[in-house]
Image (spheres, helix red, strand yellow):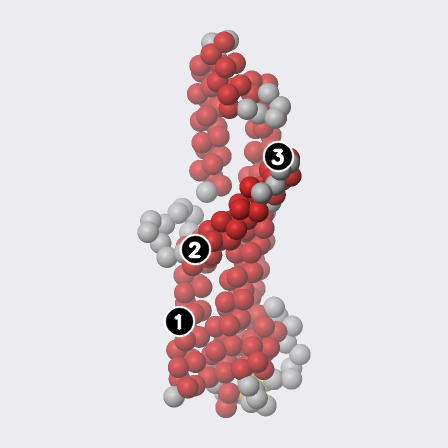
């Protein structure tokens, strides 16, 4: 009975993570009313991160601290997905103990086997001998490769987007000052009659924000 519950629980957890991963990374456009487990966690982390930043007296330090949340959040997101997959597959492995040689002595051993398979760093001390266990190990190994590929792809994509942003920031300095100020941007546009430039500037940044989000 316990083994069956572990298999069901592990399968449900893996399916939830795969769905969250698909909606957040694979899907080319944001889904409406989607279930986003990692987004919920990141929002809670952001509350604490922002609270720490708001307590900093130095504006430069505060801005640096707040700006670091983006890349830290991306790494945290993939880390949480990885840990959740390790836990989900560990439940599946623990529920299939008789199909593994030697059988895991406890859940900690199943967790170890799952972690070394996802990375993958399997040392061969545990070997699946049943059809179900072999399929689970194969699926977890493939999941690790897919997760790593998605992480690398997303990081390169975000790097390209932020590099494009830096180029736009340099061009923005001419009318908004350095560092750019929204107030100065509006004042310069009004003073020099730069209505069209103002519209194009906002449109450019709107497109960049849509591309990143």
- Mark 3 or mark 1, which is nearer the start of the sequence? 1
Sequence order check, earlier mark of 3 and 2: 2
* Residue 51 can be seen, yes or no: yes
Label 3, label 2: how far apart the Cα atoms are = 28 Å
Instruction: Specify whether 11 is left or right of 166.
Output: left
Residue indicated by mark 3? 59
- Residue beneath label 1, please? 12
Residue at the (49%, 49%) spot, across then down: 47
Q: Residue at x 58, y 43 (%)?
A: 55
On the image, the x and y values in percent for residue 181 come to 55, 24
Circle 2 residue: 40
Q: Distance between the residues labelled 2 and 1?
A: 18 Å
Q: Residue at x 44, y 75 (%)?
A: 10
- Asked which quadrant contains residue 127, the reply is bottom right
Element assignment for label 1: helix
Return the x and y of residue 141 as percentages of the image width and height. Answer: 55, 71
Residue 26 visible, this orientation: no
Among numbered discs 2 and 1, the one appearing first in the sequence: 1
């Amino acid at each position: 009975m316990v083994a069956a519950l572990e298999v069901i629980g592990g399968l449900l957890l893996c399916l939830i993570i795969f769905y969250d991963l698909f909606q957040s990374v694979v899907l080319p456009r944001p889904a409406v009313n989607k279930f986003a487990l990692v987004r919920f966690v990141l929002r809670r982390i952001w509350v604490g991160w922002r609270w720490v930043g708001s307590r900093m007296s130095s504006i430069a330090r505060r801005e640096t601290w707040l700006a670091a949340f983006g890349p830290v959040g991306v790494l945290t997101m993939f880390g949480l997905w990885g840990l959740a997959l390790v836990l989900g597959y560990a439940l599946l492995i623990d529920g299939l103990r008789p199909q593994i040689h030697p059988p895991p002595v406890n859940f900690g051993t199943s967790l170890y086997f799952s972690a070394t398979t996802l990375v993958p760093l399997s040392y061969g001390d545990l070997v699946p001998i049943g059809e179900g266990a072999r399929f689970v190990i194969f699926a977890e190994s493939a999941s690790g490769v897919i997760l790593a590929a998605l992480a690398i792809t997303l990081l390169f994509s975000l790097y390209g987007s932020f590099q494009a942003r830096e180029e736009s920031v340099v061009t923005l300095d001419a009318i908004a000052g350095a560092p750019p100020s929204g107030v100065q941007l509006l004042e310069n546009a009004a003073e020099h009659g730069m209505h069209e430039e103002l519209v194009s500037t906002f449109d450019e940044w709107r497109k960049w924000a849509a591309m990143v989000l």
